[in-house]
Amino acid sequence: MKSEIDETKFRRIVVRSMRQLVLLSAFVLAGCAQVKVVGPYRAGLSPSDVQNIIQIAQTIERGSYSRLTIRAVRPNEVWVDAVAHGGTFFYDYSAVRRGGTWTRGRYTPPPID
């Protein structure tokens, strides 16, 4: 019985560590200084969801990001505000989950100077 308890504790630690690793990988991949997940449906986003949403930002504008704010507005929809290149490049987009896959929705490009 004692070995079963120890094994259960071990699995919990491994799962927590894996979640942290996934989030850290997502931040490093996007080069983000800060990622915030807010909104009424934020608890429904897994670390994998966050990573997929961040990867969409990289398809719009490659490079480093100062800040990404992911606003979970519906169970399968988020709005993302992005600040890239040291605060000199701003844009926003939505992402929608269809069949378990996140895809880019609307996109608002930065204003033209």
Image (cartoon, rainbow, N blue to C red):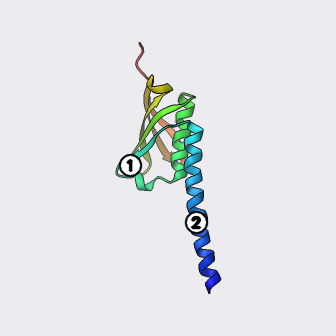
Image location of residue 100, percent across then percent down: 54, 51
Image location of residue 49, percent across then percent down: 52, 49
Secondary structure category for the residue under label 2: helix
Does 43 sit above or below residue 34?
below
Q: Nearer the viewer, mark 1 or mark 2?
A: 2
User: Can the viewer see residue 4?
Assistant: yes
Which numbered marker is on residue 85?
Answer: none
Looking at this view, is 102 or 67 the one in front?
A: 67
Which numbered marker is on residue 74?
Answer: 1
> How many neighbours does mark 2 have within 10 angstroms: few (below 14), some (14-19), or many (20 or more)?
few
Secondary structure category for the residue under label 1: strand
Image location of residue 14, percent across then percent down: 61, 64
Q: Residue 28 falls in which quadrant of the image?
A: top right
- Residue ID for mark 2: 13
Looking at this view, is 39 or 88 the one in front?
A: 88
Q: Name the kind of residue labelled 2 in the image.
A: Ile
Looking at this view, is 6 or 106 the one in front?
A: 6
Q: Name the kind of residue labelled 1 in the image.
A: Arg
Instruction: Locate the N terminus and report the quarter of the image it occupies.
Output: bottom right
Residue found 55% across the figure and 54% down from its top = 20
Q: Residue 87 falls in which quadrant of the image?
A: top left
Direction bottom: furthest residue: 1
> How many neighbours does mark 1 have within 10 angstroms: few (below 14), some (14-19), or many (20 or more)?
some
Looking at the image, tell me whether mark 1 or mark 2 is earlier in sequence order. Answer: 2
Direction top: furthest residue: 113
